[in-house]
């Protein structure tokens, strides 16, 4: 009986797909009008928007994310957290001068799933 229950649990574990709970966020902003605009740099805080001081540059592959002359950026694969995430952007010109930071935008995330139920039993009758 116990081995049948273990087999049932293993079968469920093997055949129920495991979901990924990371989220994506799309940032949008108004375009700058400078003729020498090169693009924008993205800044990000994965846990809080209330931390004192500036946010850290968003890094992908060890390089700060800088987008061209676009007014949208899709931040993919946000970490699994329950809490607030925060972004800012700056404008960069062709001489690599960087503007002051934009306003901060934040979103509350709830990407951590609840704990799985425990104590499942089956009785074969």
Image: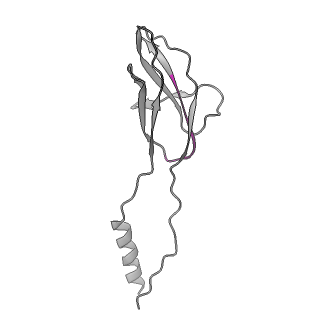
Most foreground residue, 30 or 8: 30
> Compared with residue 66, is residue 16 higher up or lower down, i.e. above or below?
below
Query: Measuring 39% from the left and 23% from the top, which residue is drawn there?
Result: 70
Question: Which quarter of the rendered picture does the C terminus lie within?
Answer: bottom left
Q: Is residue 19 above or below residue 56?
A: below
In this rendering, the answer to whether 30 lies above or below 11 is above
Compared across the picture, whether 92 is left or right of 17 comes to right
Q: What's the residue at 45%, 47% (across, down)?
A: 22
Q: Main secondary structure of the magenta part?
A: strand
Q: Residue 88 magenta-drawn?
A: yes
What's drawn in magenta, residue-wise? 80-89
| Quadrant including the N terminus | bottom left
In this rendering, the answer to whether 4 lies above or below 58 is below
Q: Is residue 96 visible?
A: yes
Number of marks: 0
- Inspect this view and state whether residue 64 appears: no
Image location (x, y in percent) of residue 98? 50, 14
As drawn, the residue found furthest toward the bottom would be: 125
Q: Is residue 64 magenta?
A: no
- Position in image of residue 11 (x %, y %): 35, 72
Coordinates of residue 48 in the picture (x, y in percent): 60, 37
Q: Position of residue 97 (x, y in %)?
A: 48, 10
The answer to which of 48 and 7 lies nearer the viewer is 48
């Amino acid at each position: 009986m116990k081995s049948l229950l273990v087999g049932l649990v293993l079968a469920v574990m093997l055949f129920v797909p495991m979901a990924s709970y990371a989220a994506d966020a799309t940032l949008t902003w108004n375009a700058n009008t400078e003729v020498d605009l090169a693009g924008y740099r993205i800044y990000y805080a994965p846990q809080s928007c209330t931390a004192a001081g500036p946010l850290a540059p968003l890094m992908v592959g060890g390089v700060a994310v800088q987008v061209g002359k676009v007014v949208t950026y899709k931040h993919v694969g946000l970490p699994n957290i329950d809490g607030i995430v925060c972004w800012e952007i700056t404008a960069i010109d062709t001489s690599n001068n960087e503007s002051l930071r934009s306003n901060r935008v934040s979103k509350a995330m709830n990407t951590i799933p609840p704990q799985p139920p425990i104590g499942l039993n089956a009785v074969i009758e």
